[in-house]
Structure formats: C-alpha cells, structure tokens
Image (spheres, rainbow, N blue to C red):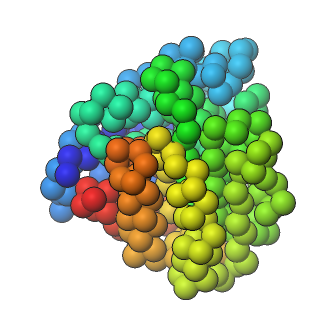
C-alpha cells in the first residue's frame, strides 16, 4: 500500500541545546534506518509550512505570533525549563504542523490512505496558549482541526501511545464532543495530567494510566478490552495517531516496557478500525522516543504496519 512520508530538512535545524534529549539525532536515526532498508510503497514528500490560519484553530492569536517572534538570532531562548528555541526553531515548528495538515489534505484527497509525519519538534504537550514539554505547536490538534474546518470531517479519533500524557491535545479537545482523544501513558510521570477521571465534556477523553514497569501483556489487554471498543463505538471518520515511542523498554525518559512489536500491533488495530469506519484513512505524527536505536526500530515497525494494511 502507498504510504506518504512527510519530512523537511528544517526539522534537523531545530536545536534545543547540548545534551537535550529531543535532538536532531532522533530524525537522523529514523532516516538512516529507512535508507538502509527501504519500505515498499513509501513515498517521501516535503513538509510545507503551516499557515497562521491553520495554527489559530488550535492556538488562538497571538500565541503563534509570539512564539515565532521569540526565536533568537543566536544562541538559545527558553519558553519553559524543557522547551528551548534556537535559530531555525520557528521554521521547524511551522513545517511540523504543516506536515500534519498536508498529510490530511493528501489522505482526504485520496492520494493515499496512510501518512506519517517524521518531523520535530513534537506537539502533544503544547496547550492553546502555552509551549511546554519540548513542544511549540500541537501538530496533531492542528491537523484534526484542519480536517474539520477545511474538509468537513465530523468525528475524529486521536490515539496517543506516547509514554507521557498529551495534556495539550486534551486541553484543545476537552469541550469538543466530536473528537475522541484516547491516551495510554505512564503514571506518575510528566506532565502530571491524564488521570482516568479526566473524561471531557461528553466522555470524549479516554485516559488510561500504567505503572512504571508495565509491559506488553497488561498494556495490550487494557487497549484491547477497553480502548479499542470505545473507538469502534465512536466510529471515527478519520484516525489520527500521536506516535510517541518512549514507552519502549530502552527509552531513557520513560519506565514502561513496550517493544517494537507492540507498536506494530496497535498500529494494525487502529488501521483496522480506520478500515471499518474511516475509509482506511490514518495519519500518524511523530511525538516522543529518545533512545535512537529503539526509536528507529519502532518507527520501522509502525510504518511497516501502516504500509501493510
């Protein structure tokens, strides 16, 4: 199956500083993995810039303008203790959000059923008026709202398997009954949100927490018995994935024990639900994952599952 792969060199020029885990080596590891053993059907496309109109749907003015103006001419500037801008960060963030919107456009135009956005900085911690957790703009939220406002898509499901809760995505869609946000994440862990009782305006937020050390069997059981049926009942017209791979057992920022096969499994299950309800349409956006070898292997498993369905 044809699988679109959105990337732009600008993503490599965002530099949060020496020793920062969210560095360009993450993408270089992914690109190297795919160069060494290409995936059949993978078609690379250049990520465009998001427009202010697209950004404003998730981040009302003047937040995007203020973030872009905050970019330093030289050196580094901190938006919060973990979220740093360098020269080029604004361009990278615009193209990360733009990749997600372009993926929506291409998939909804029927150019492919599946797309993956290999961009950084990640996005799911960015709240409507606040950058945090390495994230400047909430790429997955911008994509979802673009699908709704530019293409008339009604019910949208977002599944987030990053080890950290996507507090920003939850904040954007808390009062939106037409968007189902489902997240599996470790607890306790940054950012301290995402408890099971946080359910949104219409039960449209589905959080499931896992203790450090949780491995494949327990995680899969909860997803299979609890979360996938909820998505099935919601019957989304479009499936979006916040694809963070830091729940991998080798990741230095998480404490869960998932492996590559788990990411392939959840991808297959979400793709099957998309086949049932959304004409097979799936768009995946890179979030976390900080052990470069584990990240590259996990992304490969994810992409192979998307391409095979």
Identity of the residue drawn at 35% across and 44% down: 279
Residue 102, placed above or below residue 125:
above
State the residue at coordinates (38%, 64%). Answer: 268
The answer to whether residue 192 is left or right of residue 125 is right
Is any atom of residue 85 visible in this view? no
Please tell me in which quadrant of the rendered image residue 11 appears.
top left
> How many marks do you count on the picture?
0
- Residue 45 lies left or right of residue 279; in this view the side is left
In-front residue for pair 245/2: 2
In the rendered image, the vertical position of residue 226 relative to residue 213, given as above or below? above
In this view of the protein, which residue sits in the foreground, 9 or 213?
Answer: 213
Q: Indicate the position of residue 53 as horizontal and vertical percent values.
A: 56, 14
Task: Please determine whether, in this image, residue 139 is positioned above or below residue 124.
Answer: above
The residue that appears at 26% across and 47% down in the rendered structure is 3
In this rendered view, identify the residue nearer to me: 213 or 114. Answer: 114
Which quadrant would the C terminus be assigned to in this image? bottom left
Give residue 33's quadrant in the image: bottom left
Residue 117 at least partly seen: yes
Residue 226 image offset from top left, x and y in percent: 63, 70
Q: Is residue 255 above or below residue 36?
A: below
Residue beneath the point at 37% across and 27% down: 105
Residue 175 position within the rendered picture, expressed as x and y whole percent measured from the top left: 77, 36
Q: Which residue occupies the extreme right position in the image?
A: 197
Question: What percent of the width, then of the height, locates residue 125?
Answer: 68, 45
């Amino acid at each position: 199956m044809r699988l679109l792969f959105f990337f732009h060199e600008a993503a490599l020029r965002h530099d949060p500083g020496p020793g920062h885990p969210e560095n360009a080596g993450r993408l270089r590891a992914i690109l190297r993995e795919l160069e060494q053993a290409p995936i059949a059907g993978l078609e690379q496309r250049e990520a465009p810039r998001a427009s202010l109109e697209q950004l404003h749907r998730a981040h009302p003015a003047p937040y995007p303008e203020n973030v872009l103006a905050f970019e330093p001419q030289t050196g580094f500037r901190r938006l919060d203790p973990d979220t740093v801008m360098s020269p080029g960060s604004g361009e990278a963030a615009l193209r990360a959000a733009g990749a997600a919107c372009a993926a929506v456009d291409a998939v909804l135009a029927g150019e492919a059923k599946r797309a993956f956005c290999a961009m950084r900085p990640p996005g799911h911690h960015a709240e409507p008026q606040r950058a945090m957790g390495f994230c400047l703009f909430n790429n997955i939220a911008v994509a979802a709202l673009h699908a709704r406002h530019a293409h008339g898509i009604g019910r949208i499901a977002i599944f987030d398997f990053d080890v950290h809760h996507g507090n920003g995505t939850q904040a954007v869609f808390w009062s939106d009954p037409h968007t189902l946000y489902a997240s599996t994440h470790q607890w306790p862990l940054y950012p301290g949100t995402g408890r099971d009782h946080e359910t949104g305006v219409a039960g449209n937020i589905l959080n499931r927490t896992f203790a450090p050390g949780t491995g494949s069997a327990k995680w899969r059981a909860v997803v299979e018995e609890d979360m996938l049926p909820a998505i099935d009942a919601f019957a989304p017209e479009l499936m979006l994935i916040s694809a963070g791979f830091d729940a991998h057992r080798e990741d230095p920022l998480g404490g869960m024990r998932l492996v590559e096969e788990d990411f392939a499994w959840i991808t297959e299950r979400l793709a099957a639900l998309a086949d049932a309800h959304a004409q097979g349409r799936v768009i995946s956006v890179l979030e976390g994952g900080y052990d470069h070898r584990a990240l590259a292997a996990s992304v490969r498993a994810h992409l192979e599952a998307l391409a095979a369905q």
